[in-house]
Amino acid sequence: MTFEILERAAAGRLGRFTTAHGKVTTPTLMPVVNPNISLLTPRQMRDQFGTQMVITNSYVLNKHEALRTKALAEGVHKVLDWDGPTMTDSGTFQMYVYGDVQLQNDTIVGFQRDIGVDVATCFDIFVTPDMGRAEAEAAVAATIARTKEAVPHKGNSLLNATVQGGVHYDLRKLCAEAYRDLDVDYHTIGGVVPVMEQQMYPELAEMILWSQAGLRKDRPVHLFGAGHPLIFPLAVALGCDLFDSSAYAKYAKDGRMMFEWGTAHLAELAELPCACPVCSKHGADGLKALPGKEKETALAEHNLHVSFADLRRIRTAIQEGSLWELVEQRSACHPMLAAATRKLGDPTYQAWLEQREPVSHTRALRYTGSLTHQRPIFRRIRERLQTRFVPQGEPVEMEMDTGFANKGDMRRELGMHKEPGGKPYFAGRGSLDAAMDHAVVCALGPVPAGLDEAYPFAQSVLPRLEGLDRGHMGWVGETKDLFLAAHGFVPAIPGPGGKDGGVQFGKLQVLRTADWQFGAGAGAALIAGDLRLETSRATGKLRTVHLGDEHILSLRAHDGFWTLKIAGARLVHKALPSPANRVVVAADSVPFNRAGKSVFAQFVKTMDEGLRPGDECLVVDEQDTLIAVGQLLLAPDEVHDFKKGMAVRVREGIPV
Ligand code: GUN
Ligand code: ZN
């Protein structure tokens, strides 16, 4: 297997990329190594920065007689004195910079194969952002044709197919889709260097989004020529797994230092705002006083220290689920970057991103500022409040006209509770008036009673309403109005809960959270009967749910969602018709899943496209017989694309 997803956040993936010369943990950066003039050797880079993979240029290797001879005789790894994963580029970039490069696609791909590179690159055509549509279209067509031509020449190397299209976004998707069924292994998003140089970050974001929209999800994606940490969080959040950098050396040559917040000239710095070994050792004056080549090397080292540290930070953010926060924080470093992040709030992009957004994270959701409310999870909250909520209160006749209803209308009342200081909002408040539904309006919208222990409602840190930015306040207001309208609610001041008639919290939590997770109607099926709730002595929180004699649900402590026991799964299966919550597996997988073994992606026939990574799901055969229950690890389109690897971690199988 070439690429596996280990952890995820936003559309970002912490992955494992396997090459003939070892495994690479992504996202990562491959420094560009120039075989002619190298400030640092790959082995030095591994020792100093933890470099896992490097990239060099096959055009340069092929052009110089001595290098070509050595590379062909001993391999590219010997030339670089490096035994780790190695990629080569083809000469496209030189063609873009210098214009006249004499090169044949099949020759240069064959050369890369012959020197034993791990990832070889086709001779694609660089589409610049100023190209008109016709020219871009022709270049994309030629790039696709060259990629097809290169496939039979790849030998034992993995083959990289580059997505071009410039700023004609639909061409990007078209180009990416043309690669889906080709025998290629790896993708770069190309033609982005001039866009990055001109700090056209909104366009960069759209180039990535549209390329990703067409690409297969089971191959690593590399943003070609991107080596400045400023944009790493955003690019990773949009699914980029690898970066390459010659910038570290080019900047060093000009006396420029990269920081994750931007770039500065050493000459202009009185102090060094950096804790890397180079800066710590020399200080600003010491660094300025170094002789030419030594200074250049020191600056290159600093640039790589900063870049690799940022990638460690990003991988950590994926692991703990705080990548969106990092993206938003980084956006504050450059106005155009902020504009790029704001672009992700466009409904189309938000919808794309929502499909990859995991159901929960181990770390609480945190507000960073005015970009927070356009995260995909907020779209999900708004949607599900309308579609995955079933009102319980009885309709009452309006006694007078209100802003929401007229006298005589039959409406349900929604008890609007004051925003409390702590969380969860409802548990521990005593009983609620059973005649109406209840919600607290907060920065996450109207949070209904019973849903307030689930992610992100309990697992979040946001300001109280009065502390929010205006955009976020607007989101709250609209979301509340949509919720009221969807269920025919009128807002009401909640009365005191009756002693006997009060709502039982635990039951409400089963109902609301199950509807939220599985769809409207699931909750009612799970509480229909003799419900027995067991709470934890230590925390007072619900732990298990029995219906009659059967254990149907357990609470997932970290996110407050239900895990399904077989008896619970049967109820959901019966309550909601196919394809809801289903993952349909091929006949040859059935016995394994019945025995409790996981579902592998290649055995999935179809599935509920509404499922999200981390969702509880029903594993069924092609006749819709329930055979197991488990947790989905991938997004639906990933399940379709991955030919290997686990799709559902089965928790319990149902033996025949
Ligand atoms: N290096 C930077 N951008 C590109 C690109 O679009 N194609 C190739 N082959 N190399 C690049
Ligand atoms: Zn430094």
Image (spheres, rainbow, N blue to C red):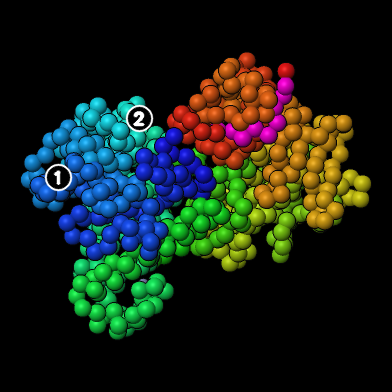
Label 1 Cα neighbours within 10 Å, binned few <14 / some 14-19 / many ≥20: many
* Disc sitting over residue 68 in the figure: 1
Magenta span contains residue 648: yes
Residue ranking furthest to the front: 73
Q: In this view, does 624 lie above or below 418?
A: above
Residue at 27% x, 62% y is: 40
Q: Name the residue under label 2.
A: 180
Where on the picture, by quarter, is residue 407? Answer: top right
Label 2 Cα neighbours within 10 Å, binned few <14 / some 14-19 / many ≥20: some
Query: Secondary structure beneath disc 1?
Result: helix
User: Is residue 298 or residue 387 the one in the foreground?
Assistant: 298
Residue 211, percent from left and from top: 34, 40
First in sequence, mark 1 or 2: give its number: 1
Three-letter amino acid code of the residue under disc 1: Arg
User: Is residue 346 or residue 95 the one in the foreground?
Assistant: 95
Q: Is residue 182 above or below residue 385?
A: above
Three-letter amino acid code of the residue under disc 2: Arg
Q: Which of marks 1 and 2 is in front?
A: 1
> With 150 as the anchor, is 513 left or right in this view?
right
Quadrant of the snapshot with the C terminus: top right
Q: From which residue to which does the magenta span run?
A: 647-655
Residue 388, percent from left and from top: 65, 38
